[in-house]
Image (spheres, rainbow, N blue to C red):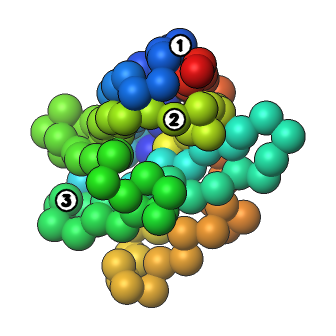
Amino acid sequence: QPQLVESGGGLVQTGGSLRLSCVASGRPLSNYPMGWFRQAPGKEREFVAAISWNGAMTKYAESVKGRFTISRDNIENTMYLQMNSLKTEDTGIYHCAAAPASSIWAHINWSPAVFQFRGQGTQVAVSS
């Protein structure tokens, strides 16, 4: 598993946008399907979005469909999450994680309980 560092969070107003980055080191990001997860204050961590190793396939939580876009640049070893039309309920700490390199996309379990989150994440705060 690569080492992952998240960045790009901040404080924005409702309707605003942010772009999060997840930079990998130690192992090539291209080997891994990747996902974004978030944890709101007082709530359990939840799945947000995922992307296959080559970017051909994506998956989104219903709550972010049409507003968030996940992408990746394997040459730069970076994954992104473009977040538009932000809502107060998007507030939380956002983490990225890598699924096992040998995973078959359709069989990946994106439950947060399956993943280890070693980074500090990046804080997103959306004010009304």
- In this view, the residue farthest toward the right is 42
What's the residue type where badge 3 is placed? Gly
Which residue is tagged 2? 87
Q: Are marks 3 and 1 in contact (CB under 8 Å)?
A: no
Mark 3 Cα-neighbour bin, 10 Å: few <14, some 14–19, many ≥20: some
Q: Residue at x 37, y 58 (%)?
A: 65
Asked whether 44 or 120 is in front, the reply is 44
For disc 3, the marked residue is: 55
- Of all residues, the one furthest to the top in this rendering is 11
Q: CA distance from mark 2 to mark 1?
A: 12 Å
Q: Amino acid at mark 2?
A: Lys
Which quarter of the picture shows residue 15?
A: top left
Circle 1 — which element? strand
Q: Residues within 10 Å of mark 2 (few under 14, many from 20)?
A: many
Q: Quadrant of the C terminus?
A: top right
Q: At numbered mark 3, what does the secondary structure look like: helix, strand or loop?
A: loop
**What residue sits right under mark 1 in the picture?**
11
Q: Do residues under tags 3 and 2 come within 8 Å of each other at their CB atoms?
A: no
Residue 96, position in %: x, y?
A: 50, 44
Amino acid at the residue labelled 1? Leu
Quarter-of-image position of residue 125: top right
Q: Disc 3 and disc 2: Cα gap in Å?
A: 26 Å
Separation of marks 3 and 1 at Cα, in angstroms: 28 Å
From this view, report whether residue 83 is shown above or below residue 58: above
